[in-house]
Image (spheres, rainbow, N blue to C red):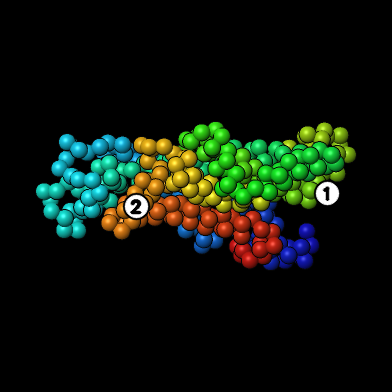
């Protein structure tokens, strides 16, 4: 390799050619992600949330659905009692108080992490798989296939996102599963359009023409060559989409169409205590804070991934 090419690689933050050959694309991507402050903060928050979800039975002092009447001398909507902060030791300790059904709010918030993470990941995974297939086929085949698929998706996009989700859940019936399905359905066009745009760009590359000249089938070219090179924008969109799915599920639960009692879902917890915002603000503050931190974690991680995977910004990463 010429000296000019080596200098170009070094200027791009890749280093010398031997180092470039020894590093895989994923290793370089991980290195760039870990140099993004927003991504580091997002990963830290996400790791903390995952820890809470996995260790919920060990962290939560009570069953999230356990009514404490007759078990402890507590009343509904009691203020938080923390012994280390001066609460009388003869009173039962409840870090976030008790809700209107005399259940430990801290345990419900902790277990709500499981519900929200599952909702976001499952919903986006379903939407990504369906949207990726539709977008890839549409962009690769083009013609009437492209027109039919994209016009159907345009019809879905013509409706307000949350309003269409409400309509779907109203038809299917209230429930967390139906809410997840509704949000996944209305999210499909976004991922399909992202994949289609990437496929339209990648399919004109020289390596695609080389594969076609070697006799590779259309499906092999699409799923073996084009699609893997179209994933970076989809990864960023999917990461940000998890935050949106969690927020929309909380909104559906808030109006009674999502999680049904006694499931410890943050949106449903806000709905059940929304009238106590002045008399017992802790019952709406902590679930709201949990939603905010979860959405913030995925948004920060998505922003970091976007910067790390954007080839126009690669010159900013130095070895």
The quadrant the C terminus occupies is bottom right
The answer to whether residue 128 is left or right of residue 284 is right
**Mark sitting earlier along the chain (2/1):** 1
Query: Can you say whether 286 is above or below 156 in the image?
Result: below
Report helix, strand or loop for mark 1. Answer: loop
- Taking 160 as reference, is 311 above or below it? below
| Front disc: 2 or 1 | 2
Residue under the point 16% across and 58% down: 86
Task: Work out which quarter of the rendered image holds the N terminus and state it.
Answer: bottom right
Residue 301 position in % (x across, y down):
53, 55
Res 213 label: none
Viewer can see residue 33 = no
Query: For the point 36% across and 36% down, which residue is it?
Result: 262
Closest to the observer, 239 or 123: 123
The answer to which of 315 and 268 lies nearer the viewer is 268
Looking at the rendered structure, the secondary structure element under dot 2 is helix
Q: Residue at x 54, y 38 (%)?
A: 169
The picture quadrant where one finds residue 147 is: top right
Tell me where residue 164 appears, x and y as whole percent: 60, 44
Judge by depth and name the residue closer to the eye, 189 or 195: 189
* Pointer 1 residue: 204
Expressed as whole percent of the image width and height from the top left, the position of residue 286 reads 35, 53
The picture places residue 253, in percent across and down from the top left corner, at: 45, 43
Q: Badge 2 is on which residue? A: 275
């Amino acid at each position: 390799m010429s000296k000019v090419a080596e200098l170009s690689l070094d200027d791009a933050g890749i280093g010398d050619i031997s180092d470039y050959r020894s590093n895989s694309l994923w290793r370089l991507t991980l290195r760039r992600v870990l140099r993004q402050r927003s991504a580091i903060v997002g990963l830290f928050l996400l790791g903390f949330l995952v820890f809470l979800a996995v260790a919920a039975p060990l962290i939560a002092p009570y069953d999230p659905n356990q009514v404490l009447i007759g078990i402890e001398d507590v009343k509904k909507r009691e203020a938080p009692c923390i012994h280390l902060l001066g609460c009388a030791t003869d009173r039962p300790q409840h870090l976030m108080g008790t809700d209107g059904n005399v259940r430990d709010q801290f345990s419900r918030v902790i277990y709500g992490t499981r519900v929200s993470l599952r909702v976001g990941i499952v919903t986006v995974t379903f939407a990504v798989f369906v949207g990726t297939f539709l977008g890839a086929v549409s962009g690769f085949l083009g013609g009437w296939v492209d027109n039919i698929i994209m016009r159907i998706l345009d019809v879905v996009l013509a409706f307000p996102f949350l309003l269409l989700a409400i309509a779907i859940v109203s038809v299917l019936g209230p429930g967390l599963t139906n809410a997840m399905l509704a949000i996944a359905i209305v999210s499909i066009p976004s991922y399909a359009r992202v994949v289609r745009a990437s496929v339209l760009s990648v399919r004109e590359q020289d390596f695609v023409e080389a594969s076609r000249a070697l006799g590779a089938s259309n499906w092999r070219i699409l799923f073996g060559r084009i699609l893997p090179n179209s994933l970076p924008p989809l990864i960023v969109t999917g990461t940000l989409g998890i935050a949106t799915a969690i927020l929309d599920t909380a909104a559906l639960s808030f109006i009674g169409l999502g999680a049904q009692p006694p499931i410890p879902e943050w949106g449903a917890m806000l709905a059940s205590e929304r009238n106590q915002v002045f008399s017992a603000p802790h019952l709406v503050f902590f679930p709201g804070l949990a939603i905010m931190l979860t959405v913030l974690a995925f948004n920060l991680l998505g922003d970091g991934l976007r910067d790390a995977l954007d080839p126009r910004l690669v010159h900013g990463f130095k070895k």
